[in-house]
Amino acid sequence: MKITTFNPMICTTHPEEIIALFEALGFERRHTKTNLGDGSMSDVRMALGDFRVDVATVPTMPQDVMMIRMNADNFEEAYEFLLSKGFRNSQGDTISESASGKGTSMISPSGFIIALSKHKK
């Protein structure tokens, strides 16, 4: 398994406010993915030089949540590795898939979250 992306991800119900903050810091929007998960979620990838941050719109979030976005070249291997370290899938056994990738949120035994994904090329 090779990790291809590893950066912070902010999940929120008010993305434009957070995106505006990062734009004020000099970050630029790189791309936007829509209709993720159940179709109600989206993600804006932002960059400032080598730094990246994702701002995800998740309408069901009771408050903003910070995660680590981890994209791996072998989703199944990464998923099994995290399970072996005590992580659990926040969606039970469900893994969301779209035309551009698949993923799920994995919660560590201590409570931090890795948003595990694989980008389909």
Image (cartoon, rainbow, N blue to C red):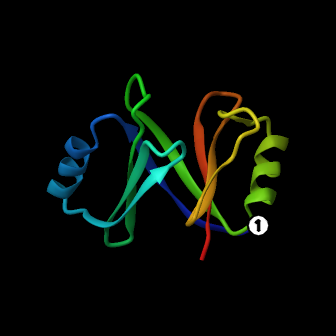
- Decide: is 59 above or below 82: above
Q: Is residue 64 visible?
A: yes
Q: Residue furthest bottom?
A: 121
Is 111 placed left or right of 54 in the picture? right
Q: Choose top left, top right, bottom left or bottom right for residue 104.
A: top right
Query: To which residue does mark 1 refer?
Result: 1
Q: Residue 119, image x and y in percent?
A: 59, 67
Amino acid type, residue under disc 1 in the picture: Met
Is 85 placed left or right of 6 in the picture? right
Q: Residue 102, image x and y in percent?
A: 63, 57
Mark 1 Cα-neighbour bin, 10 Å: few <14, some 14–19, many ≥20: few
Is 47 placed left or right of 113 in the picture? left
Q: Residue 17, image x and y in percent?
A: 20, 42
Residue under the point 43% across and 42% down: 40
Residue under the point 19% across and 62% down: 26
Q: Nearer the viewer, residue 56 or 36?
A: 36
Count the marks: how many? 1
**Element at badge 1?**
loop
Q: Choose top left, top right, bottom left or bottom right for residue 32.
A: bottom left
Is 20 placed left or right of 54 in the picture? left
**Position of the C terminus by quadrant:** bottom right
Q: Residue 71, image x and y in percent?
A: 60, 61
Residue under the point 76% across and 67% down: 1
Q: Nearer the viewer, residue 65 or 50?
A: 65
Q: Nearer the viewer, residue 120 or 20?
A: 120
Q: Choose top left, top right, bottom left or bottom right for residue 105.
A: top right
- Decide: is 70 above or below 28: above
Q: Residue furthest left?
A: 24
